[in-house]
Amino acid sequence: MRFARYFNALRYAPRGRRLEVARKIRGAVTKEPSNVAGGYCDIGEFKSFEQFEIKYRILAAELGCAGKIPPPGELDFLHAMVDLDDVRYPGGIGSRDYFFLTALVSILAPRRVVEIGTLTGFSAAIIAAAIHRQHGSSNGITVETIDARTHCSIDETRPIGFEIPELIPELASNVRVHTERESDFLRELGTRDKFGLAFIDADHRHPWPLLDVLRLAPHVQGGGWIVLHDIQLGTYGRKAEEAGETLEGGMPYGAEWLFDRWPFRKIRSFHIGAIELPERKGALVPFALNMVEEPFEVTGKAAKRIRRALYQSFAELI
């Protein structure tokens, strides 16, 4: 391991464990192969309801569930959501992306999902409804959704997650909203290896998506999947700027870099994609160290805080 990496591990690892963590990081880097043969599949966009059923079958086969078909009520629910598109708040997940999210949740049928980045709660409602169609009504809490804010950035008069009871009133109690929290909040829930799936749609600036993945990894089952939204946001922003368009808020590359460079199995569908966690979580360390060396899109004091948090997250993986 390069000296700079070892030094940073000593500098940023949790106090009282710095030498231990630095040694484990060094061991993880030495043990893991430099090139990992991860599978990649691009199933394309979900452009219509007719395509939903076709791509559902393709995705099911890719996930080892060949022959699985959408359960009763799946398409009816999606029709109802699409009918709301003209009156929905801007900035949320679009139909082509939530078709993929619905299909993935439906096929994998996890009993518990964690989401980072709640906003209006639309995607949390999509996930909870898909779980319900697979497991029925006696599920208890099926979705834990976490957001750093208390009120929506797109409408400061509305609380985070306000759409959940509006969209799925009969399932609203299955979703638990945690505000003023970040992804490390899962430690407080005591949910190690309890989640079958995670969805990240929060701060896309590098290295926030990486930090969210590393924090979630101990709590998602080995071989489980993490869904990333906006995995072409940086490229889209660059093309828009080249065309002379003015963009608000920037178009960061964090989620895009993370997905494109993920060394393990992954599946893409236009702006959304899923990455599979390795069975042994320590295998993430070499990849994460390489990503940490990329220039941060987060700056100032926040960048220093995130760098420390990244190295601290390694302690939970090894």
Image (cartoon, grey):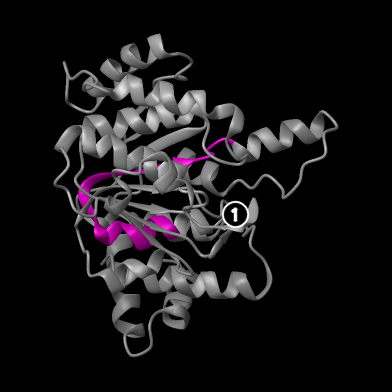
- Quadrant of the frame with the C terminus: bottom left
Q: Residue 22: name its quadrant.
A: bottom left
**What x and y, as percent, mark residue 241?**
79, 36
- Residue at 50 percent of width and 23 percent of height: 83
Which residue bears the numbered disc 1?
Answer: 205
Position of residue 159 measured from the top left corner of the image (x, y, whole percent): 53, 59
Which residue does the image show at 61% across and 41% down from the upper left?
91
Image check: 176 left or right of 230?
Answer: left
Q: Position of residue 116 (x, y in %)?
A: 43, 55
* Magenta-drawn stretch contains 52: no
Name the spot of residue 163 as percent of width and height, x first. Answer: 47, 46
Q: Quadrant of the image for the N terminus?
A: bottom left
Above or below: residue 41 compared with residue 285: above
What's the amino acid at mark 1? Arg
Visible in this render: residue 188? Answer: yes
Residue positioned 55% across, 28% down in the render: 85
Which class describes the residues within 10 Å of circle 1: few (<14), some (14-19), or many (20+)?
many
> Is residue 96 something one can see in this rendering?
no
Give the magenta range: 212-232
For this rendering, which residue is in front, 29 or 259? 259
Name of the residue lying farthest toward the top: 50
Q: Is residue 50 above or below residue 114?
A: above
Judging depth in this view, the residue of 275 and 115 nearest the camera is 115
Q: Please name the residue shown 62% across and 60% down the image.
A: 296
Number of dots carrying numbers: 1
Q: Secondary structure at mark 1?
A: loop
**Which one is in front, 293 or 66?**
66
Camera-nearest residue between 99 and 267: 99
Direction from residue 257 to residue 296 in the image, left or right = right
Q: Residue furthest right?
A: 244
